[in-house]
Image (cartoon, rainbow, N blue to C red):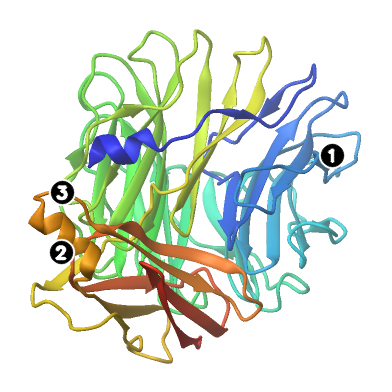
Amino acid sequence: MAASCYAQWQQDVRLTDHSGVSATSYNNGRNIASNSGHVHAVWHDDRDGNWEIYYKHSSDNGINWEADRRLTNFQEYSYYPSIANYGTKVYVVWEDNRDFSSEIYFKYSTDNGSVWSPDIRLTNISSIKGFPVISVSDQVVNVFWNDNRDGNYEIYEKHSVDGGLTWGTDTRITNAPGNSGFVSTSLSGLFLYISWMDYRDGNYEIYFKRSTNIGVSWESDVRLSNNNASSVYPSISSSNQNVHVVWQDNRDMNNEIYYNRSTNGGANWSTDQRLTNDLRESKYPSVAASGDIIHLLWQDNRDYNDEIYYKRSTDNGLSWLSDFRLTNDTNESRYPSITLSGATVHILWTDYRYGNYEILYKRNPSGNSVKVNFINSILPSKFALYQNYPNPFNPVTKIRFDIPMDSRFEERAALRVRGNDNVVLKIYDVLGKEVATLVNEGLQPATYEVKWDASGFTSGLYFCRLESNGYSITRKMVLLK
C-alpha cells in the first residue's frame, strides 16, 4: 500500500523562471492553499530588484498554472508571506518594510485570485514584527505574528469577522520572559489552535494554545516538549478534534523531526514521538491532516544535500509509513509547504537546481484518498447508495454504499481470477463541479462506508455520486455551518 501511494507522486513542476531569487517562507507560514480544484501559491521574490510578494494560481488541481502575478509594488522589502483560502476567497499576509519599520500587511481576493484588494496595513507601532501566519473560516480571519513591542518577542493576534474588511485590535497571546516566535496555526470548526517555539524555560521548547471560539478568548499555554535541547519550528494541523504538531528537535545530537498529537481538541496530549532517524539533519517540517490521514513533509540532508522528504500515517498518527524521498537533484531543495484538496496532496518548495532559487511544485492526485471502511461481507442484492448521515451535517458526514455481485465478478470467481470492480464515489457542488473524490479503487462485493470531512467547504447543497460497472446513483447532501 505504501509503495502504491508513494508511486503516485507526479513529476516536479517549475513555477518560476527568471534570474532573481524566488523563495518560500521557512517559518511554517504556509505558501500553498487549495480547495475545490483551485490551488494557490505565494512566495517572496527579488526579480524586481527588491523583495516583493508574488502569487500563482491553478484552476485544474495543479495540472496547469497561470502566469506569475506581483501582489506588492513598493521600493522597500515585502517578504515571508502566508496564504489561506475558503471557498473562492483567498487571503495573503506578509511582513513589509514600506513604512520604514517592519509591519504586517494583508490583502484578499473573493474570486480565486483574479482580482485583489488594495494592501491593508494591520499593524502600526514602533517594533520589530515578522513571520506572520493566517487561518480562515468563512468570514473570520485570524493573523498571528512575532512582535517585540514588549521588549522581547511575543505572539500577537488580530482578527476580522467580515472577511478582512475591518479588523479588531492587536491582542498579545503570550506573556513570558523568554522570546516566543515562529507560530503555526490551524482551525477546525470553532477550535483555533496555535503552536510556537518558546525560550521561557531557558531553552527553546514547543508550546500550544487553543481558543474554542475562533479567537475571542484563549486558554492557558501548554508546554508540549520537555528536554534540555532545542525544539523549534513547529507546524500544526487539525481535523475535527484531532490535533497534530511536528517540529525540529536536536535532543538526539542532530536535528530530527518529532511529533505529538491530541485526540480531544488539545485538552490532553500523548508523548513525543521521533519520526526521523538518520545521521544528518532533518528540518523545517510541514504537516497536513485529513481525517485519519496525516501527511508530513520536511527538508533532509541525509543524501549530503538538502532534499524534500515525505511520510504519512493512515491511522491518526499511531503508526507511520517509511520515509520517502520526493526530490532528487545535486542542488538544494528547501523550505517545503503542504496542503490538501480532496484526494490530492500538493506541495511547494524552494529549489536551486536551475542555478538560482526557484519555486517548484509537485502533487500526488490520490495521496489523500479517503479510507474505505468495510462494514460486512453479506453480499448485497443490489447496487445502492444510502443517504448520508447526519444530513444536514457540519463538517463531517458518513456515506454508506453497497456493491453487489454481478456476472462479471462471478465469472472471475469461477475462473479464480483475482480482480475487483472499480468503484468511484465523488462529490459535486451545486454547479455540477467536482470538488472531491472519496473513492476510486477496486472493491469486492460488500457494504462499505466512508467519511467526508467538509471543513474547507462553504455551506450549501452538494451531490454525492456513486458509479460502478455502468451503474450510477446520486444523493443530495446539505452542508450547514
| Amino acid type indicated by mark 1 | Phe
Q: Give the camera-side residue of 463 and 42.
A: 463
State the image coordinates of residue 380 (x, y, percent, origin top left).
17, 80
Residue picked out by circle 3: 418
From the viewer's perspective, is residue 433 above or below residue 65?
below
Q: Give the camera-side residue of 65 and 224.
A: 65
Image quadrant where residue 384 sits: bottom left
Residue picked out by circle 2: 410
Q: Residue at x 79, y 31 (%)?
A: 51
Q: Residue at x 71, y 78 (%)?
A: 162
Q: Please state if 380 lies on the left or on the right of 84 as rendered.
A: left
Q: Residue at x 27, y 79 (%)?
A: 400
State the image coordinates of residue 182 (x, y, percent, origin top left).
50, 43
Nearest-to-viewer mark from 3 and 2 = 2
Which comes sooner in the sequence, label 1 or label 3?
Answer: 1
Q: Please state if 97 lies on the left or on the right of 342 as rendered.
A: right
Query: What's the CA distance linking mark 1 and mark 2?
Result: 75 Å
Query: What's the CA distance linking mark 1 and mark 3?
Result: 69 Å
| Amino acid type indicated by mark 2 | Glu
Proximity of marks 3 and 2: CB atoms separated by less than 8 Å: no
Which comes sooner in the sequence, label 3 or label 2?
Answer: 2
Element under label 1? loop
From the viewer's perspective, is residue 351 above or below residue 53?
above
From the viewer's perspective, is residue 429 above or below residue 276?
below
Local packing at callout 1 (Cα closer than 10 Å; few below 14, some 14-19, many 20+) is few
Q: Which mark is residue 436?
A: none
Specify the quadrant that holds the N terminus: top left
Res 207 visible: yes
Residue picked out by circle 1: 100
Element under label 2? helix
